[in-house]
Amino acid sequence: MTDIDVRVLTDEAEYRAAHTVFRSALHHAPAPDDKWEVAKGSYEPGRTIGAYAGDELVGGTQSFPSALAVPGGAVVPMAAVSRVGVRADWTRRGVLTAMQRAQLKALREGGDVAATLRPSEGAIYERFGYGVATRYREVRIRKREAAPRVPIVGRVRLVPVDEALPLAKELFERLSPGRPGTIARWPGWWDVRVAHSEDKDRLRFAVCSGEDGDDGYIAYKVERGSWDRGVEKPTVLEVMDFWAGNARAWADLWGFTLRVDLVGEVFAFGRPLDEPLEWLMTDRRAVFVEDVADETWLRLVDVEKALSARTYGAAEPVVIGVRDRFLPENEGAYRITSSGASRTDDAPDFELDVEVLGAAYLGDVSFSALAMTGRFAGGSPEAVRRADKLFAVDEAPWSGTFF
Ligand SMILES: CC(C)(COP(=O)(O)OP(=O)(O)OC[C@H]1O[C@@H](n2cnc3c(N)ncnc32)[C@H](O)[C@@H]1OP(=O)(O)O)[C@@H](O)C(=O)NCCC(=O)NCCS
């Protein structure tokens, strides 16, 4: 590889240059001044890395300060890695690899237990230790056939966007960490995705409340349909963000979306795999699952802390050996028991790469499935089944936050 100097960027001019490199890698023009004014708030000190060839910036990546809810309810510090881009005339020369190496090291030194990203393509990040740890589904409900089985029991009210923003933030922070896989949102997330989003004028917020006050909200927009030579394109209510603190709030909010007039379909992107939406309908065939896709790509940056942070199911212990080409500090054997996890000198029952452990960590995929597909080898089926039971979770892990 040509000499590349990878370093932490320090001032606004450098952040803006990195922003431009990233946008150009995604085939967008540089951000105009007004857009940059909004975006610059999401460049936090010490969290942007640039790759230089001489004095030219040819690649960049950054991370947002976040946190991850893990099985058992603990929340660990996590970096949300984003804006990864290499200039088109510098790709496939190891620039991303050099940036990954520097970024992972910096994140570990900074105390992050994990890192996560939402990649543009599926074939890039496993080599750096990221595994798919949560998935989501996209659902479309045809309103004509859809009637919720239960009435709205609480109260659902529309709140103007400017008032809704602090309320949504407060509700999100209160309601979201219940499920493993949910992540903390950083201030720039709300600025870029809501307060200054291109859809801001079309965003609607519905907040629901029960006997104990507000306990859920949705953010949605409506895409108007049309008639073209007798063919109807339905008007679609698109649910962008949906958080409910209990079953009543959940049913009330779905019930609300299905009662908005002049809407043909309700569409929701990124919902949990185990959301029982079909069971809410009088006709379950009103619900179409359009996609099931990877959501969280998870990288365990500090394996020991990550394994110690979560709880485990009831099963006999297993010893897992971990390989990590980018963070050798993680290499070694870990003993997992129903009461916790720790490093051990015992011989491992089986060994795997850190991205395979990352995939299994939140319980979305079993070790048996990973062994069956050749993601690791060497364990007896009985030891692998013990690992399955220890890592099993009650709720499908899910993040619910796209960035
Ligand atoms: C994706 C991107 C960041 C890769 O950067 P890069 O500097 O070319 O990556 P590297 O040269 O370090 O490649 C590392 C390895 O990943 C592989 N790789 C890189 N990009 C890949 C891709 N898009 N698909 C499949 N493999 C890829 C390389 O072949 C190489 O494999 P090897 O280790 O077996 O030799 C760069 O191509 C880019 O900016 N693309 C457009 C923007 C984008 O997709 N950003 C990612 C947003 S998450």
Image (tube, rainbow, N blue to C red):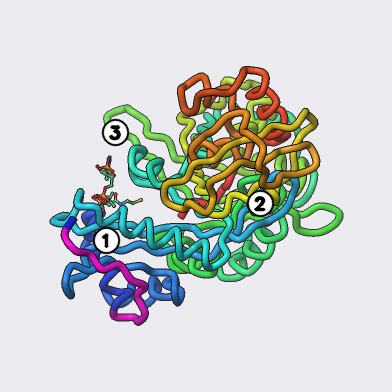
Cα distance in 3D space between marks 3 and 2: 47 Å
Residue placed under numbered mark 1 in the picture: 23
* Badge 3 vs badge 2, beta-carbon distance below 8 Å: no
> Residue 228 — which label?
3
Going by the numbered disc 1, the residue's amino acid type is Arg
In this view, the residue in front, 231 or 215, is 215
Q: Does 43 appear above or below 402?
A: below
Specify whether 21 is left or right of 190. left
Q: Nearer the observer, disc 1 or disc 3?
A: 1
> Residue at point 44% right, 65% down?
192
Could you classify mark 3 by the number of other residues whose Cα lies within 10 Å: few (under 14), some (14-19), or many (20 or more)?
A: few
**Given the image, on which type of amino acid does mark 3 rest?**
Asp
Residue located at (42% from left, 72% from top): 43
Is residue 378 toward the left or the right of residue 310 in the image?
Answer: left
User: On the image, numbered disc 2 is attached to which residue?
Assistant: 69
Q: Is residue 123 left or right of residue 116?
A: left
Which of the marked residues, 1 or 3, is nearer the chain's N terminus? 1
Residue 356, placed above or below residue 187? above
Dot 2 falls on a residue whose secondary structure is: strand
Q: Quadrant of residue 60?
A: bottom left
Magenta stretch containing residue 27, yes or no?
A: no
Q: Looking at the image, is mark 3 or mark 2 earlier in the sequence?
A: 2
- The residue range painted magenta reads 2-13
Q: Is residue 237 visible?
A: no
Q: What residue is at 69 percent from the left and 26 percent from the top?
A: 279
